[in-house]
Amino acid sequence: MMVWLILLPLLWASFAFLLGRGRGVWLAMAGLLAQLWLAYTLAEEVVASGVAMHAVGGWGAPLGIDLVADGLSAAMLLLTQCIALPLAVYARAYFKRDDPAGTYFWPLVGFLLAGLNALFLSADLFNIYVTLELLGLAAVGLVAAGGGAQQITAALRYLFATLVGSGAYLLGVALIYGAYGTVSITTLTPLITAEAPDLVWIAGGLMMAGLMLKTALFPFHFWLPPAHGGAPAPVSALLSAVVVKASFYLILRLWIGPFSSLTVAASLVVWLPALLGTLAIFWGSYQAIRAERLKMLIAYSTVAQLGYLFLIFPLLASAGALQAGIMQAFAHGLAKAAMFMAAGALIKATGQDMVAGLAGVAERMPVTLFAFGLAGITLMGLPPSAGFLAKWQLIELALSQQHWIIAFVVLVGGLLAAVYVFRVLRQAFLLAPASSVMTPVPRMLEWTAFVMAAASILLGLRGVELMQLVGVT
Amino acid sequence: MKRLLVVLGAACFVVLLIGAMLDLAPAGIALHAAVSANLPSSGVEHPVTAVLLNFRGYDTLLEIAVLLLALIVILAVGIDSTTDVRPAASPVLQALARLAAPLMIVVAVYLLWAGAFRPGGAFQAGAVLAAAAVLLHLAELLPGWQSPGARLRLGLAGGFLIFLAVGAGLLFQGALLEYPPEQAGWMILLIESGLTVSLGLILAGLFLLLSRDDGDRS
Amino acid sequence: MSAGLLFASVGVILFALGAAGVLLIGHLLRRILAFNVMGSGAFLVLVGLAQRNGIADPVPQAMVLTGIVVAVAATALALALVRRLYALTGKIELPQDDEG
């Protein structure tokens, strides 16, 4: 059953390509609805009966490839499909006919989603490499599609960063295969002990470094702001909300799976991601506060918010750290998608993309601004949003393990987020200069952004079920 | 400064890694034994083809998706409209291309068939087909491609769709891509044939779509 | 040092050379070539290290075949982007500043 989560997007992406330029919307919508239903039933099944497995080809690891769905995978699958469906509705309204960026949008998005779903389900290190490439190339394609020199430049930077990242990951896989004779995660996890040869440490380091480059963790974040800030709004939303989370999911998966003995043995190594995460929060927030273009502000906010995800690594010893990380991933995913969608609508309406040009938006486009505000509440971590739940859990865990510094960083990060969110809101509430003209935008743009933002707030009220899901290992 | 750091870092990395590789104990798991043991029920006689299309066929499925995706991205990015002036192809080259292309097609079919028993298979055959197309293009016997028409799109995506259909069809009586041992042989051949045509078209397309000249729609 | 280990060591050197190339070289075509060298290095390590004891193992060989195809796809994509950039700007290097 879970296999269809991978096969369906491959099918509708190929058919969308067959149908021709600009076609394939309805196929995509039908497919996404089915995928959402599948992800939901998979999550229910995992909570009810534990980890689900599918041995592709009937062979079983280590000869064949296994697909494994535990709580973590099911949660990420749910997040992906939940964001993809409203985004599809948004994108349909966003791209005008004959927009070169929209001509091949549906096949590209289909392959992107197939890559994501395949990545979350795979339990084979080399198979994960192929899904990483599928994901990465589709993302680069979406950034570059129909763009001018700036977009192509951003896409090329992104491409080189992602290729170096997967190259390092592949070398790590090659070393692991050489050392153990298998690339199956389930087979490897008991084999890699604290006495593993040096080669395994190097392999682990390579794979982690490659994946951190793909997650745009400081100092590897240089490619993200141009790519996410320069792409069309639906693409930015998809990239910031889900694609960067995929490599983070992999880091988590490797950290608590095959390399768990190593991370326990070298207790100082857990502080490296936390340090980089802290730097990401401060640097990203600083750049967001300084940014003059709206989408660059939001993109730098992504750099900052990704830092929170890495703060959980020193806390993984206690139960609940995983849940906090996933809650943060969900909160940021929903909120950031909503923000980019709102920004897209605002940019279309005002005809320009500077923060300073947003004056008067509050009275002309209240729904969009409200969506932006709600998303901002989640990012700041105010109750009752999912962002608040995530940060509260983080602080609680940090205090219970006496890591005061982490709690401090979380609080400061929330304050910094407030600064750049209020920058935008303040500008929007100014009276519009008499000479400004606003073009009306399709309703669908505003309302999908609003739905996404509302979801990020409401998730805070229903967080318990998500925690339960993630707890299934 | 950055240059120095990167070079030093790379050098240290090389020394460290080679040192770690040199005193490595043998691996615990020997997959080649498992492959040999299961080879008779895989439908082909060559172990690499068996791994590619049966044991790890799922990897192959995704990899074809990656290739098709690359082609779609090239179409999405848009091809520039500069028309480079190319010197006219020499008649010697054209004669050679006319002789070589049919031979290459025969070689491709052979490679496809031979893949079951010795090194060969869909990728190699598809690459040879694409090379034939590129040779014809360089000899100016085959025009460059513009936006692909319906038939070409069908050819490009067809192999992948056949692969998906067979794999998904098998889902109803077992796992994904779980070939019943007696029918594995012809199923794999069917998939490989579809893949050969599609791969040839995709790989040719990667070149011919980028090589902009006044081609006619095909 | 067996043949397999020799290949693997060369692979490591190629990987480092390629990675350094991608990071340091400005000219885009050469960067793409460096990426290919990097990929080939990783493939060499995969087949060399796994078969260092002299026994042929079809699994890494098949993995490398897959990897080659993926690298071809990535290279084609990169070339298309570079070509487009050249057509739009006439330059074949990325601009130095990172602010978009």
Image: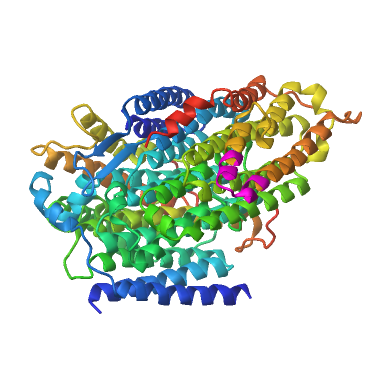
Q: Give whichever of A64, A264 is nearer the camera.
A: A264
Rendered-image quadrant of the C terminus of chain B: top left
Q: Could you tell whether A391 is left or right of A297 in the image?
A: left
**A210 inside magenta stretch:** no
Most distant residue in the bottom direction: C1
Residue A248 in sight from this viewpoint: yes
| The image quarter in which residue A441 lies | top right
Question: Could you tell me which quadrant the N terminus of chain B lies in?
Answer: bottom right
Magenta segment boundaries in residue numbering? A395-408
Residue C7 position, x and y percent, is 30, 73
Describe the colour scheme in one phrase: rainbow
Q: Quadrant of residue A383?
A: top right
Above or below, A419 against A37 in this view is below
- Along the line of sight, which residue is nearer the eye, A195 or B184? A195
Residue B31 place in picture, x, y as percent:
18, 56
Q: Does residue A424 lie above or below B71 as drawn?
A: above
On the image, the x and y values in percent for residue A158 come to 56, 53
Instruction: Using the image, determine if residue C90 lies above or below residue A441.
Output: below
Q: Residue A464: x, y in percent? A: 50, 26
Residue B92 appears in view: no
Instruction: Tell me which residue sits at (55%, 46%) in the image.
Output: A401
**Residue A399 belongs to magenta span:** yes
Q: Main secondary structure of the magenta part?
A: helix
Residue drawn at the location 38% of the way across and 39% of the way down: A118
Count of labels in the image:
0
Between residue B218 and residue A471, name the one nearer to us: A471
